[in-house]
Image (tube, rainbow, N blue to C red):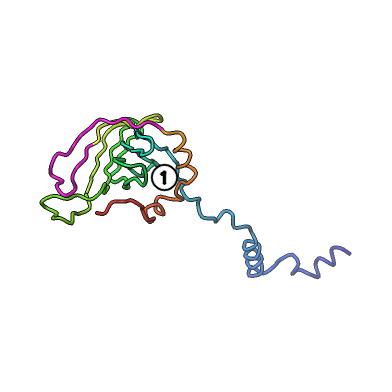
Amino acid sequence: MTLTAVASHPARLRRPCWLLAATLATATSALPLIAWAAPPQPKVETLGVYSNVRVTGGDDPHAEGYDCELYRENGQLFGLFYSSQGMVGDTPRGRLQDVRYDPVKRTLFFRAKLTLGQEINRDTGPDGRPSRDLFEFDGTLDGKRLSGSLTHHDGYRPSEPGERETVTLKFDRERSAQAREFAPASRKAWQAEDLPMGPQW
């Protein structure tokens, strides 16, 4: 009796090809889309803040020295360079440019444009003009210090040799923790942000 029932309904054994394809398409569309999700965005790593700033004075404190705030995304270093040369407060700063870093040799080179203040001389007249301060660093970076030569150029006279000094900026644990807490979401977003006390050139 079972054989007769099967033979009288051959359609149950042989479904049309179009029906099989439709069934597979419906099943595929119901699968979760996890495999098709976009890859995660690169994460910004905080390398730290390196500093040799010295604060002097009691009621009228003054700061002198440099800070360098470093991040890394996809192997590329970026960050800020600060120059303190006066009263403690908002410090002039500039974004690192032309960064070259060799993680094997630990060599680091960068430039940074800053405006440290207003300059008045025979070229500016009595009203003065914002200074153009170009810093070039060439040295090494490790987990504890950033050391090498730092050259300060006048951006209005880039062909002149500039003032060169040897610096050692040490890792600042407390400020590095703060930088890590407020690290940018990405280098692109960081570059689009306004830069308070940034260069005026």
Q: Quadrant of the N terminus?
A: bottom right
The residue where tag 1 is placed is: 73
Residue 172: x %, y % from top left: 42, 34
Query: Magenta segment: does it hold 8?
Result: no
Residue 60: x %, y % from top left: 35, 39
> Residue at horizontal 40%, vertical 52%?
190
Q: Nearer the viewer, residue 49 or 84?
A: 84
* Amino acid tagged 1: Glu
Q: Quadrant of residue 109?
A: top left
Query: Magenta segment: does it hold 169?
Result: yes
**Left or right, 49 with reference to 125:** right
Identify the residue at the far front of this view.
Answer: 59
Identify the residue at the far left of this view.
Answer: 122
> Residue at horizontal 50%, vertical 44%?
181
Q: Main secondary structure of the magenta part?
A: strand
**Left or right, 26 with reference to 187:** right
Identify the residue at the far right of this view.
Answer: 1
Q: Quadrant of the C terminus?
A: bottom left
Which segment is the magenta one?
151-171
> Residue at horizontal 13%, vertical 44%?
159
Q: Nearer the viewer, residue 76 or 173?
A: 173
* Circle 1 Cα neighbour tier, 10 Å, few/some/many (<14 / 14–19 / ≥20): some
Element at badge 1? strand
- How many dots with numbers? 1
Residue 57: x %, y % from top left: 35, 34
Residue 164: x %, y % from top left: 20, 34
Q: Nearer the viewer, residue 63 or 143?
A: 63
Q: Quadrant of residue 134?
A: top left
**In the rendered view, would you say 187 is above or below 165?**
below
Q: Nearer the viewer, residue 43 or 159?
A: 159
Q: Quadrant of residue 65?
A: top left
